[in-house]
Image (tube, rainbow, N blue to C red):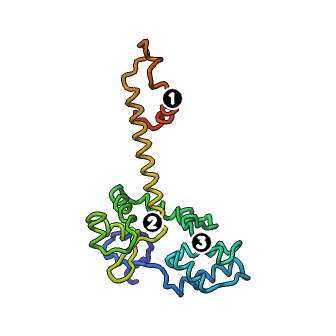
């Protein structure tokens, strides 16, 4: 028998000896439209296809097969115009297939990938998500840091846009922006807890002035800070 060969799909290289990587981008526009129409007609055989709207749908989804499958699944209850309107919130796209929780929604896919990043990669991705235009590698490296662009490309966060231009999918940008808001809230919560913890430092319940201390006028903040205060 000949040498054993494996065909493996992964969001990043496995780094095995003699591994040969083939980077998969989105479908071509005609193939993306065909995929949408095929799946949508399975959901609703009577669905009327407006080719211009279908083209707009796959453009918004950047011809990504999983996102197209989820969008086409909406054809059970919506026409193509309503499906296009629903894409104003791409992170809300969901699949009715419960067999693969990681692929249950666009948010779930991105969250799974986000969890695989280390702190430095997340910070670099947050920086790149601030760029509103496609970028070249020199710009991305100068903005996000040396080595991070290659790492994020290997983990499928950055897509090749043609020529020397690269960019993040729009759904990825929306997801990262939401993560940054959450991170900012976490930082502010930690600062709030530290501030009110410092006000309580040195309080002695045995002192006569304990019950009259000004901190007791801030009890709602104290209770809010308590779960987040460092022990």
Mark 2 sits on what residue? 173
Where does residue 95 sit, x and y in percent of width and height?
Answer: 61, 67
Q: Which image quadrant is residue 37 in?
A: bottom right
Q: Which image quadrant is residue 158 in?
A: bottom left
Where does residue 71 sit, x and y in percent of width and height?
Answer: 60, 73
Mark 1 crowd level (few <14, some 14–19, many ≥20, 10 Å Cα): few
Residue sitting at x 55%, y 68%: 90
In the image, 8 versus 176, the foreground residue is 176
Residue at mark 1 to residue at mark 2: CA–CA distance: 39 Å
Where does residue 222 sit, x and y in percent of width and height?
Answer: 48, 31
Q: Which image quadrant is residue 162 in?
A: bottom left
**Mark 1: which secondary structure?**
helix
Tag of residue 70: 3
Residue sitting at x 26%, y 67%: 142
Mark 1 sits on what residue? 219
Mark 3 crowd level (few <14, some 14–19, many ≥20, 10 Å Cα): many
In the image, 93 versus 196, the foreground residue is 196
Residue at mark 2 to residue at mark 3: CA–CA distance: 19 Å
Instruction: Check the image and report above or below for 11 versus 223.
Output: below
């Amino acid at each position: 028998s000949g040498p054993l060969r494996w065909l493996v799909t992964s969001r990043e290289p496995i780094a095995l000896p003699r591994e040969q990587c083939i980077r998969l981008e989105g479908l071509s526009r005609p193939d993306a439209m065909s995929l949408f129409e095929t799946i949508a007609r399975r959901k609703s055989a009577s669905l009327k296809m407006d080719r211009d709207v279908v083209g707009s749908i796959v453009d918004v989804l950047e011809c990504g097969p999983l996102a197209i499958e989820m969008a086409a699944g909406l054809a059970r209850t919506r026409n193509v115009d309503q499906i296009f309107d629903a894409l104003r919130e791409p992170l809300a796209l969901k699949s009715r297939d419960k067999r693969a929780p990681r692929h249950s929604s666009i948010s779930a896919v991105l969250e799974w990938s986000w969890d695989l990043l280390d702190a430095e990669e997340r910070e670099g991705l947050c920086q790149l998500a601030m760029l509103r235009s496609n970028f070249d590698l020199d710009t991305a490296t100068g903005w996000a840091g040396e080595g991070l662009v290659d790492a994020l490309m290997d983990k499928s966060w950055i897509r090749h846009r043609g020529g020397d231009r690269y960019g993040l999918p729009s759904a990825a940008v929306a997801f990262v922006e939401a993560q940054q808001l959450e991170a900012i809230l976490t930082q502010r919560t930690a600062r709030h807890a530290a501030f009110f913890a410092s006000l309580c430092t040195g309080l002695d319940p045995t002192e006569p002035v304990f019950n009259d201390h000004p901190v007791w006028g801030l009890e709602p903040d104290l209770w809010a800070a308590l779960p987040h205060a460092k022990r």
